[in-house]
Amino acid sequence: MRKYEIIAESLKEWIQDQLRQQNSGQWQDKGIKLPAVRVLAEQYQCSVSTAIRAYEWLEERHLVYAVPQSGYYAVQNGAEVEDGEWQGPLDFASAAPDPRVFPYSDFRHCVDEAMAKKQADLFLYGTERGLPSLIELLEKQFADYQVFARQEQFFITSGVQQALAVLALMPFPNGKKQVMLELPGYHNMPSLLQGLNVPIAGVRRSLDGLDWDALERQFREGDIKFFYVMPRFHNPLGTSLTAAEKKRLIRLAQRYDVYLVEDDFLADLEENTKQDPLWSYDTEGRVIYLKSYSKILFPGLRIGVAILPASLTASFSKYKKMLDIDTAVLSQAALEVYIRNGMFAHHGKVIRSRYAARMNKLYEQLNAFPDFSPFVNAPRTGGEHTVLPLPKDMPLRVLLSRLDQRGVIADTTERYYPEGAQETHQDKMLRLNISNVPKQRIKEGLRIIREEIAKLQKASTQAN
């Protein structure tokens, strides 16, 4: 065993002992602070580089995290990143974040800190933009997503759903009325627009990308107020627009006086540093940027962020205030503590690492069967989900039932279309999400899925 591994194992035991002692004690602001690198080097009679490597070893296993200009801290409920072999059905349908990796005790501490430090704010109304101290922090955080904006352009909302409702209701400078959706797309959006009596237009998005001819025709001839689009890790397809496609979309929006609402709901899972959001290409104030914290943390937090061009902020503020006085201050304050203490950055690293390992395992299984067309044609663009294109005569209900009987829960892309649009636009696909499937059992799940699809394909061939 190398020197740094011996040091790391010793620190690991010390951390676990401290955590056990702390269970009934008071939380520290940033968790348990570990010795400085030079102190550690002196303690173990080793070089500074060896001490740093010991901390890196622990950080790779998500037992400690670094806070810039402060030092290393133990993760309060630290657990190594490898998936456990949990039993039960293999749930490829759930898109919820993995509850097994969420740092409950860390975030509970942040709620306590928020209650203590933000007492005055909890008894005030009227922060319709959001908690100013959180917005100041988000301005810096969003620069990491290549979203550069001024604080007055930020609005914190009760999830992205509220932001979408405000945008659907409020007037836009172009004076237009229709909202264009991708087909397929976010499954709650059609019902939201219908409930608000907002007219809907649709444009097909397939594994090959957007139907650009139809999109330009509707931009030119229609009454399109804004186009709601998921450029990155599209739901349900899992694909992303290229830089050239994003620039093309911006040009069309400018040419035909249409706004673009960019839902970047999985920005925190991006590993490609060259994959910038649509916002970063906009030079004329055409893009509204939306980001949720539901996928990286948990849906119950109910925190979304909308960043708007200056020309839209006054109207957005007015309509948001009609829907609620302000967004839950306690959730905002807890999130602020979580980000400021370095815990959010650490948790994001854990999630990216875990999901990337699962997606890579899924791709490994897809690549293992080069003659099986649903696996061959599945997108491999990262994130947390992909789709398996199926033959047109595939009986989806039968397939889902057979999978369920064998302990695999899956979903199709049917519900991601507005009612009545399925038959016109739909490609038959099985949607697979890895956020609640252990890495060790992905091979098992893909084997069952492949077997059941193959059985139904063979039965169809024999019948014909």
Image (cartoon, rainbow, N blue to C red):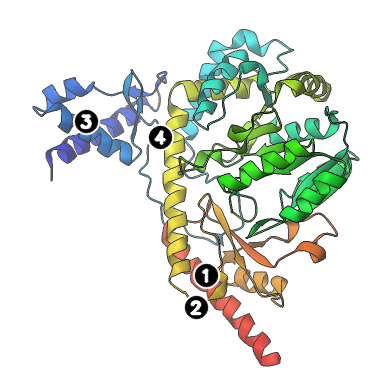
Within 10 Å of the Cα at label 1, are there few (<14), some (14-19), or many (20+) other Cα atoms?
Answer: some
For marks 2 and 3, give the one nearer the viewer.
2
Residue named by callout 1: 376
Q: Amino acid at mark 2?
A: Asp
Question: Mark 4 or mark 1, which is nearer the start of the sequence?
Answer: 4
Question: Mark 3 or mark 1, which is nearer the start of the sequence?
Answer: 3
Q: Which disc is residue 77 wearing?
A: 4
Quarter containing the C terminus: bottom right
Q: Helix, strand, or loop for circle 2?
A: loop
* Picture layout, residue 173 above or below residue 200: above
Q: Helix, strand, or loop for circle 4?
A: loop
Q: Residue 194: name its quadrant.
A: top right
Q: Helix, strand, or loop for circle 3?
A: helix
Q: Residue at 15% x, 26% y: name it.
A: 48
Question: Would you say the residues marked 2 and 3 are in contact, meaning their CB atoms lie under 8 Å apart?
Answer: no
Q: Amino acid at mark 3?
A: Ile
Residue named by callout 3: 52
> Residue 223: horizontal and vertical position, in percent?
88, 41
> Residue 453: horizontal and vertical position, in percent?
60, 76
Q: Residue at 33% x, 18% y: name it.
A: 70
Label 1 and label 4: CA atoms lie apart by 40 Å
Question: Mark 2 or mark 1, which is nearer the start of the sequence?
Answer: 2
Label 1 and label 2: CA atoms lie apart by 7 Å
Residue named by callout 2: 371
Q: Residue at 81% x, 50% y: name it.
A: 217
